[in-house]
Image: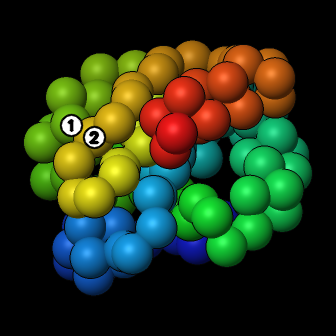
Amino acid sequence: MPKAITDAEFDAEVLKSTIPVLIDFWAPWCGPCKAMLPIIEELETEYGGRVKFVKMNVDENMTVPQNFSVMSIPTFVLIKDGTPAVTFVGSRSKADMKKEIDAAIG
């Protein structure tokens, strides 16, 4: 299960991470967000130790989602070396998610 993080934890959990971090911006009322969770959990297991997975509730955290111009959810941002490497919005298949992650982490 991806760790739920807050605006206050963002720097420590994401920007200072020694490995790439995939942020899942979501909300409890978002159906597509809920549908993506099993895929995210599978990817977290498959990429264990190579990519960190976190999730941020956009209803409870306003600053970080605003900084990343999150307008729709789910939005996924992969941070590598402290900067966004790729951003994608909406439901995706597991294969599409893997392509995006693999391309970003090289």
At mark 2, the secondary structure is strand
Q: Is residue 26 left or right of residue 99?
A: left
Q: Which residue is mark 2?
A: 84
Instruction: Determine whether label 1 and label 2 are within 8 Å by CB.
Output: yes
Residue 74 or residue 30, whichever sits in front: 74
Q: Is residue 97 left or right of residue 18?
A: right
In the image, what residue occupies the spot 52% across and 39% down? 106
Q: Earlier in the sequence, mark 1 or mark 2?
A: 1
In the image, what residue occupies the spot 27% across and 76% down? 16
| Quarter holding residue 33 | top right
User: Please, what is the three-letter code of the amino acid marked with disc 1?
Assistant: Phe
Q: Which residue is mark 1?
A: 68
Residue 25 against residue 2 in the figure, above or below: above
**Whole-percent x and y of residue 50?**
63, 64
Residue 7's label in the rendered image is none
Residue 93 or residue 79, whichever sits in front: 79
**Whole-percent x and y of residue 34?**
74, 39
Residue 1 or residue 50, whichever sits in front: 50
Find the distance from the CA under tag 1 to the CA under tag 2.
9 Å
Residue 86 or residue 89, whichever sits in front: 86
Residue 94 against residue 61 in the figure, above or below: above
At mark 1, the secondary structure is loop
Task: Please rate how many residues cluster around mark 2, counting C-alpha atoms within 10 Å: few if below 14, some from 14 to 19, many from 20.
Answer: some
